[in-house]
């Protein structure tokens, strides 16, 4: 029974990734929302990400973010869109989109860096539900390798 369930989940996962093909993207335009202090981006319909985590169930999203963090080399250069809660470290140096699993007992997050130069006041309030899209890359601090989204924007 467990083997059948694992096979079925793997098949669903593979089929969901097949629908996330890279397409030609058009320029993205920025707009300012009246009711928020941070910038959002109006997405062109053709600007679809390679990996759209917003279209997956909470269990699959949590699993895929785990894979992004454990096997980052498989995803380098791909465009990723994800929805979660905005968080930062205590020094406000690193910014994260945190995703909880289906039971809301565990969290997995991915760091992101908004596109452009400095964003004074450009990041949302802590705990805000966000959707972020950016290019998946890795970087080193010392000998430790970390994944993150670069040239990211809030959707």
Image (cartoon, rainbow, N blue to C red):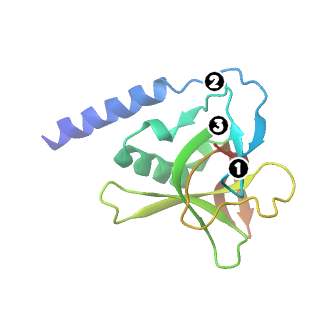
* Residue hosting label 1: 34
**Residue 88 image offset from top left, x and y in percent:** 63, 69
Mark 1 or mark 3: whose residue is earlier in sequence: 1
Q: Is residue 52 placed above or below 59 in the rendered structure? A: above
Q: How crowded is mark 3: few (under 14 residues within 10 Å), some or many (20 or more)?
A: some
Mark 1 vs mark 3, CA separation in Å? 32 Å
Mark 1 or mark 2: whose residue is earlier in sequence: 1
Residue drawn at 35 percent across, 48 percent down: 59
Residue that lies at the very extreme toward the bottom in this rendered image: 90
Q: What element carries label 1?
A: loop
Front residue of 52/146: it is 52
Q: Is residue 44 placed above or below 42 in the rendered structure? A: above
Label drawn at residue 78: 3
Residue that lies at the very extreme toward the front in this rendered image: 34
**Residue 119 image offset from top left, x and y in percent:** 81, 59
| Horizontal side of residue 152 vs 50, given as left or right | right
Q: Is mark 3 on a helix, strand or loop?
A: loop
């Amino acid at each position: 029974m467990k083997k059948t369930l694992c096979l079925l989940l793997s098949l669903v996962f593979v089929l969901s990734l097949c629908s996330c093909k890279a397409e030609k993207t058009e320029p993205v335009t920025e707009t300012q929302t009246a009711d928020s202090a941070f910038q959002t981006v109006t997405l062109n319909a053709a600007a679809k990400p390679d990996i759209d985590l917003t279209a997956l169930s909470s269990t699959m999203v949590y699993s895929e973010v785990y894979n992004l963090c454990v096997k980052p080399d498989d995803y380098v250069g791909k465009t990723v869109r994800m929805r979660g809660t905005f968080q930062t470290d205590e020094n406000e140096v690193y910014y994260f989109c945190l995703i909880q699993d289906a039971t809301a007992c565990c969290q997995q997050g991915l760091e992101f860096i908004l596109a452009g130069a400095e964003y004074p006041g450009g990041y949302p309030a802590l705990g805000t539900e966000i959707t972020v899209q950016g290019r998946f890359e890795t970087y080193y601090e010392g000998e430790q390798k970390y994944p993150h989204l670069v040239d990211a924007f809030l959707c």
